[in-house]
Image (spheres, coloured by chain):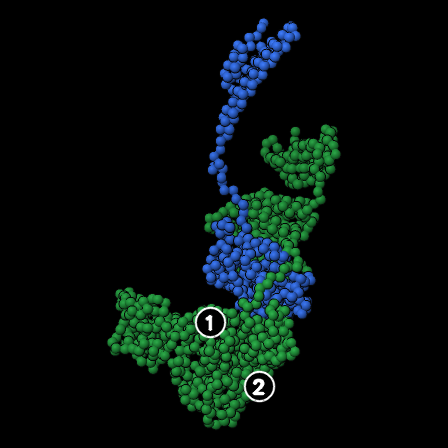
Chain colours: A blue, B green
Amino acid sequence: MELDLETHLAEAAASIEEAVDLDALSEVDTALLGKKSAVTTAKRGLGDLEPDQRREAGGRLNEARATIEGLVASRRTELDAADRVVRLEAERMDLTEADRGRRLGHRHVVTQTWDRLEDLFVGMGYTVAEGPEIEDEWHNFGALNFPLGHPARDMYDTLYVDYGEPQSTLLRTHTSPVQIRVMEAGEPPFYSIMPGRVFRSDTADATHMPVFHQLEALVVDRDITFGDLAGTLEAFTTAYFGEGFATRLRPSYFPFTEPSAEFDVQRPDGSWLELGGCGMVHPEVLRAGGLDPEEWSGFAFGFGLDRLALMRHGIDDLRELFRNDHRFLSQF
Amino acid sequence: MKVLLSWLQEFAPVDGDPADISDQLSALGLAVESMSVVGEGLDGIVVARVLELAPHPDADRIQLVQVDAGDGEALQICCGAFNMSVGDLVPLATLGTVMPDGMEIVRRKMRGEWSNGMLCSPTEIAMGDDHDGILLLDDSLDVGRPLADAMGLRSDVLFDLEVNPNRPDAMSVAGVARDLAACQGVPFALLSPDVAESGGDATDRLSVEILDPVLCGRFVARVLDGITIGPSPTWMANRLTSLGMRPINSVVDVSNYVMLELGQPSHTFDLDQVAGSAFRVRRAAPGEKLVTLDGVERTLTEADGVVADADDTAIGIAGVMGGASTEIHDGTSSVALEMAWWDPMSIATSARRLGLRSEASTRFEKGADPEVIDLAMRRFAELLGETGASLAPGTVDERGHTPARESIRVRTDRVNQILGTDLSRDRIAELLGSIEFAPEQVGDDLDVVIPSFRPDSATEIDVIEEVARIHGYGSIERTTPRSTITGSLTQRQLDRRTVRTTMIGMGLDEVMPVPFLAPGDLARAGLQVDGITVTNPLVAEESVMRASLRPGMLATLAYNASHRMTGLGIFEVGHVYRQPDQPQPLPDEREHLAVALAGSDAADAVGVWSALADALAARDYTLVADDPAGLHPTRTARIEMAGVVVGDVGEVDPGVLAAFDVPERVAWLEVDLETLLGLPHGDRPYASVSRYPSSDIDLAFEVDDDVPAAEVEQRLRGAAGELLVDLALFDVFRGEPVGEGRRSLAFTLRFQADDRTLTDSEVSRAREACIGAVEGNLPASLRA
């Protein structure tokens, strides 16, 4: 039977259009293009025709088949899109329900400040040195040029511990003993910072704690000068606080440095803040560290690390750092 | 140390805006703690006499004071101070007065009683630190006169300086003036007191013997006759008040005045009361007793120095306080004036031991000037001369040991090398000369004689500091040395950061409890160790150094729980301190990590540990069930790596939690980082990833409860052979159909070869081996 292609194509187009979902389209697809479809059957009947006729009829059949395939494909695209909308709508989620405040922990503000300072000084070419918190009298005082009974010891209210000879072992009052340990352990040049925990016999109040943290820097090299100290402090201040913070040095007294100075930082509003102490490493301290002060010179500076943490976050009470209240800790 | 600008100007023509002078003093190392203008803003304040004192009917802390403000009428003032008596002269701020702090005095009712002005304390009119009581004025002032006029007050600037311990010279007005003059480049000159001498020669009237030349470096005595004890002149009293000393009487005030002005303390003895008119300076005998000026009997030791009389009876404690027996009084006519130089260490020890530190002892402790005594003697006589006293000729001057003042070689090159300056020898000499360091040129360098008032300066570096100070720290060019090494953190420091980062990533907050514990805290935490004790703690609660982080962590949880913050996960990285097993110079101090998870169980703590082990690439550990004291006896394991214990993981013992008032279950991990990070960890050799397919098998065993899963795992690993690339426990099940006292442990194992696809029979052989190893060695059976 001769297939009326025009009618067949019209009927095919209608049935494809009528397929309401992908399953129905699949059935229509089979009916129109499958092994038992009119087009396939007609194609099989071509063998009976003359070659010329066969070519011509075959061409028309292929054309019709391609047309039908095109219609099916385009309907499939339509149905796919509709189906995707339905499927994904069914997956709809309220993400505000999902936000249950999953959290990381919080690094203590002192640690944050400590790490920041370490990174800054490492960038300036320094290493980080450490020492014991329970120190011997020699490293904490003697090697740092505090003779016994020297009035400067008045400035350091020391907590001693029951270990060894009486008054031989103490809770270090500053990070400066690490200077000696650095000199004992290696060969100059030294460019080191020494952050750490220190102790004083102080009653806790808004600005004092019996335990607090300092950061000390020691540079020992050939021809290090007081000008180098002042320049380094300025470089550090700019790196830590930013541009617009001037520094100044005022004469002061520490047994382990000479000349000694306090260093102040000027805030952009013009007010000065006392930041720490500094100076050229005293020749006796270099000797205590096994170095010849005629060959090597150096500077040291130190400041309270907690203070920087307080300043950064506008905290007005040092005790908060050690109270460990969750409402405090989780803010940083 | 406080100084008045007008007083400084008596030594040098220093001048300028007070704020500039303040900056100059700070730049000299005499930090200005505060600066105030005094003698201004006193308009409206008059001298008034107290006529009557009566209690306020409705207030305990206020009294009603009737005063005469000059018109003879009684004027009622409500006053909160109670230190005055009827007849006293007091400053009255009359109505309308604007006080120096800006407050205006108005008529007002205080608890129903009218107050017609305000009586002033020294602080309120910038005349001293005392704010507890009303300033009591000299009786000789005219009632009704403006206060400033009556007292001869003039506008002045008061600087309160923080003097460093190495600068005893700056504990005097003259010393501050010397520095400031050098800074301003104006001449400085000490005083030349004008004193006429009369009467019997002192050398015939008293004698001095120094028996301990270390204790006493110099002892000078002179005699003053015609003493009358009365009030000091107003100008002197005003200055003393401004500098924070209360005027007492003419003799005491002159002594204080000279000490403030020149830095030299003095002592006066009633010459008639000194047995034999002799002064013998020696160490006290142990147990020797003396009644001091304050009427207290003191028992002395060899640490104290004394001045004794001809009978060898102590009549004063050297440099600390005089004795009552020779105190001057209204009937005193002649005094022996003593000025001495005492050994700083001796005075420091004695004053501290006796609890009698004073302005005088402080100056001796820090090192007085042995050579200023002659001038100070004459200055004393000059000032006391205003009250009619006269200085007798003759001086008894005995010397012991004072520090040697040798000249110091100061190398020009060294100065510039230390400071980074380019100062010439002559410029250095000029700078030093301005503060009386006497330089003499020696080739390119200087030999510098240190002045006697600078005991702190004794070496070249000390002098270099003076050069820098007078040159100006701010004038030194700033340079930044380029570090000649590479900046870096050590592996240990990097690992510590990894530890913290891991804890943060696990959602834990870092805490920082103080490392001090109360006695018993360690025992309360179940720890049987003795902490290192503090020998001089401020409070008993802070007398033991922690031997474990546990007490501090539990106290932190308890604190937060008491503030309704529960379920916290916290960690700390910090030092613990212990008695070492073997004698060593310092205690065993090591860094620990502690983790406490409130409201969680041991499994969570194990999870934190395994995450940490993963982060540090420290995977070869084993958990061994253990019951260390203070931890949960059935939910704790010790962590072993390479056969070494590195920590404990599990839960805190409920009894310990109760003792710390922690209301929740607490999962616990404490790791000795010193040990852990000392063991091999971190980078491992690369193992290539196989490109051949892998085969997975699951094996579930019923195992007796007392067999650790780790033991099953160990058997599986042993039997699976080299082809095993992964093994995990993925399910634990208890209950039917698994028998009582057992649980099902389900493992998944992945096998893979680097060079081929595994055959079914290879996998099957491995599976059989695994089953055999577990069933054959453990009370376990494969589940169907």
Residue plotted at (58% across, 48% down):
B501
Q: In the rendering, at what x and y percent does residue B552 appear?
A: 55, 54
Q: Quadrant of residue B334?
A: bottom left
Q: Decide which of B778, B72 is in the foreground and name it.
A: B72
Label 2's element?
strand
Residue plotted at (52% across, 26% down):
A84
Q: Amino acid at mark 2?
A: Arg
The answer to whether one can see residue B187 in this image is: yes
Which residue in the rendered view is the most extreme toward the left? B73
Could you give the CA–CA distance between mark 2 and mark 1, rounded to whole angstroms?
39 Å
**Residue B16 located left or right of residue A4:** left
List the residue tagged with mark 2: B399
List the residue tagged with mark 1: B21
**Mark 2 neighbour density, 10 Å: few (under 14) some (14–19) many (20 or more):** some
Q: In the rendering, at what x and y percent does residue B357 appear?
A: 50, 75
Q: Decide which of B222, B382 is in the foreground and name it.
A: B382
Disc 2 sits on a residue from what chain?
A: B
Which residue in the rendered view is the most extreme toward the front? A52
The answer to whether one can see residue B534 in this image is: no
